[in-house]
Image (cartoon, rainbow, N blue to C red):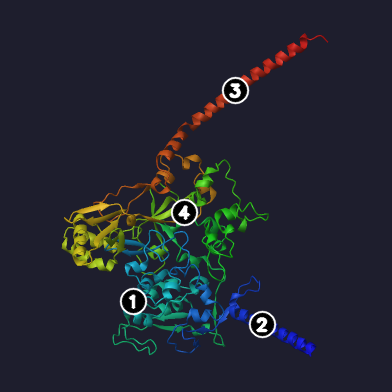
Amino acid sequence: MNKWICKQTVQITLITLMLSAVFAWQTQAQEELLGDVRDGSRSSSVHVIDLYDAEESLIRPGDQPIMPFSTKETCAKCHDYAKISSGWHFNAADPNIDSGRPGHPWILVDYLTATQLPLSHRRWEGTFNPEEVSLTPWYFVQEFGRHLPGGGVGENDSTDVADVFVRWMISGKLDINCLSCHDAESSHDQAEYARNTRNQNFRWAASATAGFATVRGSAKSMPDNYDIYLGVAPDDARSIPPSVSYDQSRFNPQGKVFTDVAHKIPNERCYFCHSTKTSSSGKWHTDEDVHLAAGLSCVDCHQNSLDHSIIRGYEGESDLLDNLIFETSTCKGCHLGDESTSQPSHGRFGAPRPKHIGLPIVHFENLACTACHSGPYPDKRTKLVKTSMAHALGAQGILKLDEVLPYIMSPVFVKGESGKIEPHNLIFPSYWAKMEGDSIKPIHPKEIQPIVLSLIAADSTTDSTNYALINSGKWPDFTTELLTQALDSLSSLDSTGAIPVFISGGKLYQLTKSGQLISQKHEAAKPYSWAIAHDVRPPAQALGANGCSDCHTLNSPIFFGKVGIQTPLGFADKSSVSMSKFNKLGRVFPGLFAFTFFFRPWLKILMFISCLVIMVVLLIYLFKGVDRILKTLASQEW
């Protein structure tokens, strides 16, 4: 009896273990989708796939679909959309994500009110959360959707204000647009993405970029009671509802579509959001980044795993992310390697090991690699630069003049969080705000526009000048009288007791109780800067390639360059700020050290003469010593 019980127990245990193993295998199989598990082949996967709309309905040739295909529903059949959405490009608004080193902010720009306000959801010091200036997710996507990859804020309608809820219903959410990065087709048009987000066609934006789909119409022109499922056009014949049509020739006999999706993202996809142009210089004046010229691609260094936590490539980033090779994705890691490991950890993609012959070690302790090798070559004054995120580069219908807001200066040599000097882009914020104690709350430019317009219109002396500047995208000319009247008008409209202020050029302007305009320094007026690493220049074009005089002179840009103060206030002090203010070395030590280089040639001559004198003296004494030895030997009896 006991043997039978033992036998049954063993059988039950084995069956239980087998069932547990099968259950575990099935669970793992469910978690790992087809496209998330690679078999080791380096060939590209061919994506001949079904298209699904947001309702998970199949789209077939000959259909007249009301809804466009959804990247979320289409790609999620083979890829873990939830895991991907946790990546760096999509998680900015997640409070649980470490913000990392300060980076390029979104910049709210308004020509009329002279506003250039840095914004970020990432809690970077010197930026404001978009919702602090009334940019809820809906308005944020409308403003900056042109260069958003979707997901994150674009899918978050839960915290938005009630009066735009119906607009979310019409426009749809801005899902992650996988094609923004992974579409390798030459017909991919990211400018259409920008145009459609501007027209509130959020759910149609991804389709508009694809080479096999065409989007017409505008959700922005639809009334609040428009029914997207009925698709009935409003009475206004000029308003065209959003719709999508597909190239029927792209569907195969099974109703599937070939999409040229690349695992290794083409550089052109990165460029749409990450281009920088130095003002007053054409494409033919700018050399390509030395890494790209050598055949590398952006994603060779900026790698990521399935979670899309892309490596930004600065030292110390490994503390923020897990399970990725960070050490070889920094300048030092790739070119110098880790000496503590027994295996070679440098020289990826043929990276040369620099020797830096004769360069004192103090340079590596106080300078980042980018200080000498990256960004625009420094001059006596900083240059204005334009970036995709700030100036909507690549979008349609933008002002292409060089001096267009926002005004970003580069390179500014700043002592970064690592304690090393590195090149930065820098912007002086300019905006209207309300001050309560030391707390500053920005005001959205639309609240200020009527006041400024009325004051400009009333001032016949500046009317035409200001309107011309506004249309060109430059600063308007704010006089003392205009600023005083604008602040006074804001004060009369505010019943909370907050003090209206204008922040620009590194200063805060406000009215005293007697109505006098005064200015003062304030933390909220400090310039915001972020590190730059591209374009990388080759050794022959690096600082120091011409010798010590590149940096150690009394007018060297890295220590004594001039950073122009940007402000629309014609009466304000627009004198330049010395670079020493940002690299925190002061002017005395670098100046004294540079001054010594005037005497270094003399010192070298003096040292050479001194060495000759010492050698002569040594030779004289050597000969005397030899003579003494010979005389001593000669006097001895053998």
- The disc at residue 614 is 3
Question: Can residue 467 be seen here?
Answer: yes
* Marks 1 and 4, how far apart at CA: 37 Å
State left or right for residue 555 relative to residue 296.
left
Going from the N terminus, do you reach mark 3 or mark 4 first? 4
Percent x, y for residue 576?
33, 47
Q: For the C terminus, which image quadrant?
A: top right
Q: Residue at x 36, y 55 (%)?
A: 527
Three-letter code, disc 3? Ile
- Label 1, secondary structure: give it: loop
Going from the N terminus, do you reach mark 2 or mark 3 first? 2
* Marks 3 and 1, how far apart at CA: 85 Å
- Label 2, secondary structure: give it: helix
Residue 530, compared with residue 161, is above or below; it is: above
Asked whether the beta carbons under mark 4 and mark 2 sit within 8 Å of each other, the answer is: no
Three-letter code, disc 4? Glu
Q: Which residue is mark 1?
A: 161
Going from the N terminus, do you reach mark 1 or mark 4 first? 1
* Marks 4 and 2, how far apart at CA: 50 Å
